[in-house]
Amino acid sequence: MKIALLALLGLALGALGGAALGIGAGLAWVEIFKTTDFEGYSGMLVFFTFMPLGAAIGGIGGALLFAVIAIRDTEIAIEREPLRQRDR
């Protein structure tokens, strides 16, 4: 259950971060390659191509990353013995 919840959290956070990076990459693309702004073409390119791609890639990457972290956490977890109190 913990792994699934962390994977969902990674999906949400990865999608948000990926969308933001996708917008940044799209704006850079428009500036570098001098994409035409006729009838808002450059804006549509950024928000209908780069943002969804970034969100999808970021969501998948975030979900996988958080799931791997959760799986490793359950493998590494070692049950510690309680410390003995000193006899007084």
Image (cartoon, rainbow, N blue to C red):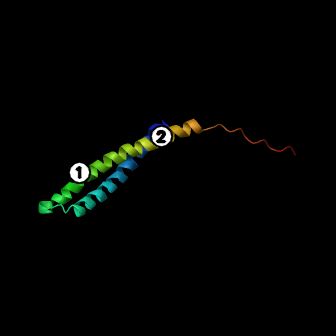
At a point 78% along the width and 41% down the height, the residue shown is: 84
Tag on residue 62? none
Q: Position of residue 35 (x, y in %)?
A: 18, 60
In the foreground, 30 or 55:
30
Are dots 1 and 2 in contact, CB under 8 Å?
A: no
In the rendered image, which quarter is residue 37 located in?
A: bottom left
User: In the picture shown, does residue 35 fall above or below 54?
Assistant: below
Tag on residue 49? 1
Q: Position of residue 41 (x, y in %)?
A: 15, 58
Label 2 sits on what residue type?
Val
Q: Position of residue 58 (x, y in %)?
A: 36, 48
Label 1 sits on what residue type?
Thr
Q: Which residue is mark 2?
A: 68
At a point 19% along the width and 56% down the height, the residue shown is: 44
User: In the picture shown, does residue 86 fall above or below 33?
Assistant: above
Is the residue marked by circle 2 packed among few (<14), some (14-19), or many (20+) residues within 10 Å? some
Q: Secondary structure at mark 2?
A: helix
Q: Earlier along the polypeptide chain: callout 1 or callout 2?
A: 1
In the foreground, 77 or 27:
27
